[in-house]
Amino acid sequence: MDLLFPIAGLLLLLGTPVYLHAVVKLGDIVQAEHPEWLNRTGSSSFFFAGTPRITDPNVGISVIGLAFSSRWRTLQSPAASTYVSHIRLLLPLLLVVFVAVLVAIVVLKP
């Protein structure tokens, strides 16, 4: 039990940048091939006017939704399948680790 927090921290520390890299790269691929898929705007989109499109939370959610749908198979880039598999693997894994840490904090009260 003493290694629970260091291992979880290491998984979160290493997994989060890989996950974010995959989301950004898949967003770039989708923006180049099918920009109409990322034309979502919300009420807060004007805050992100001068930043890259992927920083808009609506676009990020669109990319994640695309990764978990079957539309990604229509992308021509061979790297798209790699980024989709990274997102599909790391998002649930990181969420489970994060929830496990929260539960351990409540139960163990370190």
Image (cartoon, helix red, strand yellow):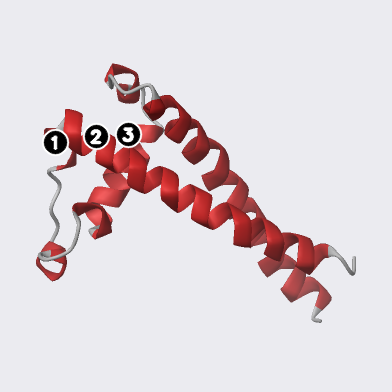
Q: Secondary structure at mark 1?
A: helix
Q: Secondary structure at mark 2?
A: helix
Q: Which mark is residue 35?
A: 1
Q: Secondary structure at mark 3?
A: helix
Q: Which mark is residue 66?
A: 3
Residue contact between numbered discs 1 and 2, judged by CB atoms under 8 Å? yes
> Alpha-carbon neighbours of circle 3 within 10 Å: few (<14), some, or many (≥20)?
some
Foreground label between 1 and 3: 1
Can residue 67 be seen by looking at this rendering? yes
Instruction: Tell me: residue 95, above or below residue 34.
Output: below
Q: Which residue is mark 2?
A: 30
Q: Amino acid at mark 2?
A: Val
Quarter occupied by the N terminus: bottom right
Foreground label between 3 and 2: 2
Q: Nearer the viewer, residue 39 or 11?
A: 11
Residue 38 location in percent, x, y?
18, 41
Residue contact between numbered discs 3 and 2, judged by CB atoms under 8 Å? yes
| Mark with earlier residue (3, 2) | 2
Q: Is residue 90 found left or right of 26 in the rendered image?
A: right
Residue drawn at (38%, 34%), measured in percent from left and top?
67
Q: Is residue 42 found left or right of 59 in the rendered image?
A: left
Q: Amino acid at mark 1?
A: Pro
Instruction: Tell me: residue 47, above or below residue 24.
Output: below
